[in-house]
Image (cartoon, grey):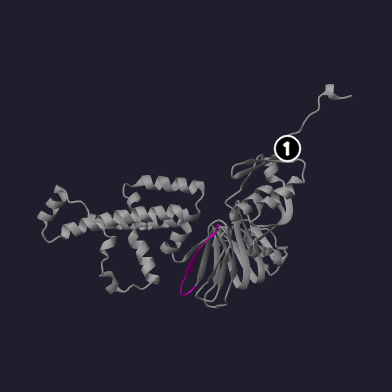
C-alpha cells in the first residue's frame, strides 16, 4: 500500500471518529468530554474534522433534503442583500493572475465555508437539539422541559421525556434504538422478522410486542413494562462463566413489573408497579416512591431551567421522600419539604439551596 492510500485511510478513520464524537457529545459525561479534548490533541487534523462535520455543507444537505428548492430561483440575485467587498491591491492582483476568475471563485467558496462553520458552531451553542435534528435525522433530542413523540417507519412510536436523546438504527433484519440520555416510552409494532431492541450502555431490552419505559440516571437503568413482555440482557450474559451467572444476567419482565440494572450489570428481581404512575411523566407529573432527594431534584431539573435546586450534605441528598408533583412547579416541592423542621432553604438568584437546618444548642446559663 503506497503512502497516499495509507494517508487516505487514516483521514477517513479520523473523519469517522469526528462524526462519532459529535454524536457522543450530545449526552456526554464530564469524563467523556475530557476524553474528547484528549482526542482533539491527538492529531493536528482532528479539530478540522470536527469543524467540517458541522459545516454549512452538511446543514444545507439536511435542510434541502426536506425542502425542495427550485434551481431557477437560485439564479435570481437580489442585489439589495449583497454587500460589495472593498477592492484592494491584493484582490486586483489575484484577478490579474487568473483572468478566468477561477481563483477568485475558489477563495470566495473558502471564505463562505469559514463563515458557514462559524455559523454552525454558534447554532450548536445556542440550540443543540435543533442542530442535532439537522445533522443526525435519526437522532431525536429534547431540551430542558421539552417532550416529543416520534412515529417510526415500522409503525412503532417513541415518547421522549425532557432532556433526553434517542438514536434509531433500522436495518433489514433488526430494529435497534439507543437511549443515550434520559427517558423514553416505547410502543412497539409487531414484526417477527425484525426484533426491536433498546440499547442502554451494555444493557439490551428486547421487546416482544409490547409497551415499556426505559430510564437511565445516576448509574442505574430502570425498565418498566406497561404491556406485553420484554427480555433484558446485559453484557455479563455473554461473558458468564456459569449457568447461575447467566440466569442473573438475563431476565424476562411482563406487564405490571419493573426491574433496574446497576453499574455491575446485575438485574434486580421484577417487582410490581402501578402502570399509571409509570406513564405519569407524559402528563408532566412526577411520581416519587421512596426516592432520594438527589433523584427528586434531578427530575425537576429535567423540566425546569429555573430555579435550580442544589442540595447540601450527602446525608440530606440520600434522604428518601414520596409524593406526586407538577413537573413545572418545583416550588411545590419546597412547600412539601418546608413541613420538615430539619430542612432549611436559601434562595441565591436562580438557585435554591436545600440544606440541613442548623441545630441551636441551648447553653447551660440559659437553663432556669
Asked whether residue 100 appears in the rendered view, the answer is yes
Q: Nearer the viewer, residue 241 or 313?
A: 313
Q: Nearer the viewer, residue 244 or 195?
A: 195
Horizontal and vertical percent for residue 292? 69, 49
Residue annotated with mark 1: 357
What quarter of the picture does the N terminus occupy? Answer: bottom left
Q: Residue at x 38, y 47 (%)?
A: 40
Asked whether residue 1 appears in the rendered view, the answer is no
Q: Is residue 198 above or below residue 365?
A: below
Disc 1 residue crowd, few under 14, some 14–19, many 20+, Cα 10 Å: few
What quarter of the picture does the C terminus occupy? Answer: top right
Residue stretch rendered in magenta on the structure: 163-173
Horizontal and vertical percent for residue 332? 70, 52
Query: Which residue lies most toward the right here?
Result: 368
194 left or right of 295?
left
Q: Nearer the viewer, residue 87 or 102?
A: 87
**Secondary structure of the residue carrying numbered label 1:** loop
Q: Is residue 41 above or below residue 7?
A: above
Amino acid at each position: 500500500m503506497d503512502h497516499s492510500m495509507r494517508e487516505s485511510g487514516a483521514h477517513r478513520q479520523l473523519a469517522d471518529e469526528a462524526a462519532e464524537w459529535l454524536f457522543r457529545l450530545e449526552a456526554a459525561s464530564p469524563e467523556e468530554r475530557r476524553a474528547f479534548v484528549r482526542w482533539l490533541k491527538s492529531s493536528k487534523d482532528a479539530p478540522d474534522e470536527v469543524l467540517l462535520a458541522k459545516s454549512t455543507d452538511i446543514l444545507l444537505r439536511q435542510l434541502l433534503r426536506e425542502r425542495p428548492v427550485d434551481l431557477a430561483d437560485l439564479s435570481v440575485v437580489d442585489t439589495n442583500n449583497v454587500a460589495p467587498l472593498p477592492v484592494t491591491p491584493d484582490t486586483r492582483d489575484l484577478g490579474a493572475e487568473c483572468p478566468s476568475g477561477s481563483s477568485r471563485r475558489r477563495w470566495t467558496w473558502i471564505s463562505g465555508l469559514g463563515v458557514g462553520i462559524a455559523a454552525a458552531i454558534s447554532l450548536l451553542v445556542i440550540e443543540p437539539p435543533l442542530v442535532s435534528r439537522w445533522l443526525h435525522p435519526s437522532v431525536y433530542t429534547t431540551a430542558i422541559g421539552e417532550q416529543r413523540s416520534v412515529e417510526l417507519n415500522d409503525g412503532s412510536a417513541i415518547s421522549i421525556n425532557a432532556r433526553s436523546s434517542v438514536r434509531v438504527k433500522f436495518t433489514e433484519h433488526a430494529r435497534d434504538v439507543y437511549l443515550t440520555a434520559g427517558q423514553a416510552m416505547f410502543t412497539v409494532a409487531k414484526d417477527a422478522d425484525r426484533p426491536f431492541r433498546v440499547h442502554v450502555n451494555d444493557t439490551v431490552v428486547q421487546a416482544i410486542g409490547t409497551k415499556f419505559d426505559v430510564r437511565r440516571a445516576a448509574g442505574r437503568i430502570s425498565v418498566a413494562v406497561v404491556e406485553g413482555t420484554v427480555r433484558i440482557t446485559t453484557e455479563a450474559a455473554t461473558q458468564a462463566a456459569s449457568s447461575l451467572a447467566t440466569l442473573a444476567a438475563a431476565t424476562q419482565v411482563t406487564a405490571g413489573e419493573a426491574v433496574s440494572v446497576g453499574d455491575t450489570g446485575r438485574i434486580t428481581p421484577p417487582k410490581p408497579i402501578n402502570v399509571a404512575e409509570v406513564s405519569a411523566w407524559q402528563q408532566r407529573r412526577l411520581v416519587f416512591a421512596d426516592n432520594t432527594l438527589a433523584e427528586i431534584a434531578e427530575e425537576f431539573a429535567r423540566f425546569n431551567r429555573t430555579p435550580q435546586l442544589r442540595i447540601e450534605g450527602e446525608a440530606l441528598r440520600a434522604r428518601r421522600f414520596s409524593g406526586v408533583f407538577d413537573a413545572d412547579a418545583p416550588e411545590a416541592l419546597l412547600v412539601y419539604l418546608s413541613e420538615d423542621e430539619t430542612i432549611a432553604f436559601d434562595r441565591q438568584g436562580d438557585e435554591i439551596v436545600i440544606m440541613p437546618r442548623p441545630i441551636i444548642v441551648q447553653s447551660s446559663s440559659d437553663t432556669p
